Amino acid sequence: MNVVKVAIVGAGFSGMGAAIKLQQNGFEDFLIIDRGVDFGGTWRDNTYPGAACDVPSHLYSYSFELNPNWSRSFSKQAEIHAYINEVAAKYALARRTRFRTEVTHAEWDSAAGVWVIDVTHPDTGSAQVRAEILVGAIGPLCEPKLPDIEGIDSYRGQIFHSARWDHESDVTGKRVAVIGTGASAVQIIPELAPTVGHLDVYQRTAPWVLPRADRPYTAAEHWLFRNVPGAQRLSRSAIYWSHELVSFGLTYRPNALRPAQWAGALNIRRGISDPVKRAKVTPSFSVGCKRMLLSNTYYPALGRDNVDVVTDPIAKVTATGIVTRDGAHREVDAIVVATGFHVTDSPGFDHIVGREGKSLAQVWATDGMKAYKGAMVHGFPNMFLMIGPSTGLGHTSMVFMIESQLNYLVDYLRTVTSEQITRTEVRAERQRDYNERIQQTLGTSVWENGGCASWYKDSFGNITTLWPGFTFNFRRATRSFDLDAYDTARGSDRITIGATTA
Ligand code: N01
């Protein structure tokens, strides 16, 4: 059995960031656990053709590890993954990481005051790790969501999810279907369209796809970033503040986003000449309600003669193709399922069990995912979620949110160490008040009023995934650990919950 102070589950941007910050602040007793073979999380798993970030790389990277060498404004997956691996190597994180190790269950042991974490490894089998503090850094976009379509299991051709791209399957010249038109599909489709024989794009809801200001950095810019102190930080700040302006429209004044909608409409007109196709791909909701996508190549790809946009709902999948409700049967050699992820209903929530013997899934089943500052959940002592509920963004870099939470995590560890606190649990009323304020702020938002259905909402219709408003407010809220929001216990004391003990 392995006993550590902090167990970090997940070796993506947030888990690595947590490990680096712990290390830098003298908390060396930690272990990272990841089911994959490498660092990178979503940037390791999403290798589909065209995978790239839709936030400029100078912002979508750690502030403490700027990279002057980004080749272009919106880097591709391989470059981002390489950056992540360089950072991991610089901080020697591999020596504290167990790869190919999956957490099957994590349960708070009240008597011992530790998290008991069951893990399994394909070669060495099951084992247990005990940790005083559990950092859940599994990311919201790690569990691929397969569509619940009749007959999909009977399909005999190649079929795979966008986040599990099968590079052994060569679809060149073949008949291919892509189900979904979200952020992943919008990047995949332009790569597939020119190489496959025929492409059917199954669109349930047309997204807004805006022009993408993507270009390679020039040699002069690279020289500046490498040699002029502050040049890169200045560029990063300019990107940050220009993106922050968008959050004003998203949260408070959706009408202010109209220019983006015009740009989207222009993008359609430029990319597609056929009026029937144009009409099919024109969204019927306000821009920003679903994630605003960026591409200069998506609409031209849809406009190609070998690409059909199918808007009739899918009725079933057969052994050889897809049948739509109008009865048409389109045969295909391969199906790419680009249908997103389990965000508000992640299977991982079943495996984390708190103080009262209930899993996160059970606790959140009654009225949705809730946490305090996206990190701490009442009933789950000594657990810190990275980019948990209400931390997602529709307009800028998640790394900014991750680093905000890292400030909070480090100050939490400093505080409990200096105060000799062994158990910390957020008070129910503080968590409730915090979430009520978030829901109030969301009342004016485009996500609430824009006329769309999206994964930002849970099954209760509540937006529990997004941080509303400006990200600098989240940075301020997480600057220091507010001990008064927590019930605590010291030494071997039982944790104090209000007037009672548990
Ligand atoms: O998934 P999505 P994604 N039958 O959930 C459709 C991040 N990301 O993987 O809109 C038919 O957005 C669904 O239709 P509808 C980013 O945060 C970032 O594309 O629900 N269709 C939708 O079109 C993003 O938001 C980057 O009506 C079905 C699509 O599948 C998040 O990941 C790149 C269906 C799912 O879209 C997820 O993006 C990629 C069904 N049964 C991803 N079920 C970058 O940084 C679902 N759909 C660039």
Image (tube, rainbow, N blue to C red):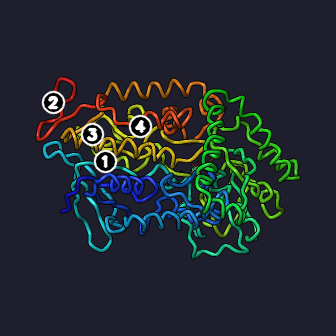
Q: Mark on residue 501?
A: 2
User: How far across and how far down the image is residue 397, in percent?
Assistant: 56, 47
State the SS at label 3: helix
Q: How far apart are labels 1 and 3 at the CA level?
A: 25 Å
Which residue carries the number 4 mark? 479
Q: Quadrant of the C terminus?
A: top left
| Badge 4 amino acid | Arg
Which residue occupies the foreground of this view, 31 or 287? 31
Q: Mark on residue 415?
A: 3
Please report the residue visible at 21 percent of the width from the left and 25 percent of the height from the top: 498
User: How far across and how far down the image is residue 419, in percent?
Assistant: 20, 38
Looking at the image, is mark 1 or mark 3 nearer the viewer?
3
| Badge 2 amino acid | Thr
| Badge 1 amino acid | Ile
| 172 up-or-down from 96: above or below | below
Q: Is mark 1 within 8 Å of ligand 1?
A: no
Q: Are marks 1 and 3 in contact (CB under 8 Å)?
A: no
